[in-house]
Image: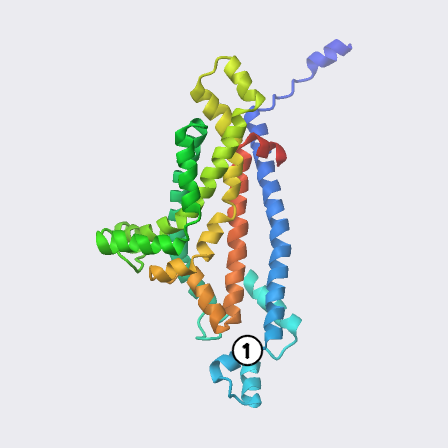
Amino acid sequence: MTTTEARAATPPRPARRPGTARARRVLGRVLATLARSVAIFVPVFLVATFVTFALRSLSGLSPARIQLGEQATPEAIARVEAEWGLDRPFLVQYGDWLAGVFQGQLGVSWTNGADISTLIGLGLGVSLSVATLALLIGVSAGFALGTLAALRRTTWIDRAVTGFVTVISVMPPFVVGIVLVAVFAVGLGLFPSAGYVPAADGLGPWLAHITLPAIALSFDVIADVARQLRGSLVAAYRENYVTGAIVRGLSPRRIFFGHVLRNGLGPALATLGLKFPALVGASVVTEWIFGLQGFGRFANDSAQAGDVPAVQGVLVVSIALVVAFNLVVNLVLARVTPAAQRGV
């Protein structure tokens, strides 16, 4: 059989489907992003929790002093600490606690004996509601302002947007919250001044109670997104590929959405990596103003009371929030921006 006949007799290989190859590339990017997130999460988690345990041992905090007071006898303190397992070696305590975390158990509060996972879940539901709405408001308004400033760069509109963003960026959330309560709750009666209603009790009351605190927290997000987006879009307009698109006769709308926005969106999205966890955990004063028993207030109360297991639980949840939200942002970046796709 000749070479030509052999080639003719060999069945042709099935052509590789473009969709399959693309799916594999997407899966590879997702797995690479997950691997990087895990590589960051594990050492940060171990170091942070280990340091917290070490500081607790050095500080002398114990449930005995919280429950029995400072006048408790050494025998009574030793008995209570033995009940809590604090008489065991430090590494044994840390290992047991770590094993419980991997099973979804964050321990028991020293102050009231309640399950910490339940306490954190109650506060986290409130804070997540407010933070999610604040993020939506901040991203929407910041995107609109940043895009408007970039499209009208060097004009009075650009200067007005820049000035407005500068003003709201230096306004503390608690000041904004007080003004919102005075105007929209007390003065106009449009929103409740304090309290929280779960979404299960009705979307209307739920939104009414979280709107004002969400607006108070959204100002910083609006400012950061608008500034980052405006700067990155203006820089993208100066790139050679935009000049080439103009020479080819593409419409301004197609140039903006097909080239400028896609390449300039990365820095604005990257700023959101830490914004959402910060909104969840750093709103203690705002939660006090609006009478919300949220995650930030729970963390503050636990630290003030010396409730070390609760503080450790807050730390675990905070690290998980940071890693999870950064993972989502990285996946979006890998999908939206070409530069991020090449970097994965």
Q: Quadrant of the C terminus?
A: top right
Instruction: Name the residue carrying label 1.
Output: 62
Q: Nearer the viewer, residue 159 or 12?
A: 159
Any part of residue 154 in sight: yes
Q: Nearer the viewer, residue 193 or 205?
A: 193
In the figure, residue 244 lies in which quadrant? top right
Any part of residue 135 in sight: no
Q: Position of residue 107 (x, y in %)?
A: 51, 69
Q: Position of residue 263 (x, y in %)?
A: 53, 29
Q: Quadrant of the N terminus?
A: top right
Left/right of residue 336 with respect to residue 292 in the rendered view: right
332 shown above or below 211: above
Q: Nearer the viewer, residue 27 or 109?
A: 109
Residue at x-position 38% and y-position 52%: 130
Left/right of residue 308 with respect to residue 221 in the rendered view: right
Q: Nearer the viewer, residue 287 or 13?
A: 287
259 shown above or below 141: above
Left/right of residue 179 with respect to residue 302 in the rendered view: left
| Identity, as a three-letter code, of the amino acid under mark 1 | Ser
Q: Position of residue 187 (x, y in %)?
A: 22, 54
In the figure, residue 118 lies in which quadrant? bottom left
Left/right of residue 292 with respect to residue 309 in the rendered view: left
Label tally: 1
Q: Residue furthest right?
A: 2
Residue at x-position 54% and y-position 29%: 235
Residue at x-position 59% and y-position 75%: 59
**What is the secondary structure assignment of the residue under circle 1?**
loop
Q: Position of residue 101 (x, y in %)?
A: 55, 63
Q: Residue furthest left?
A: 188
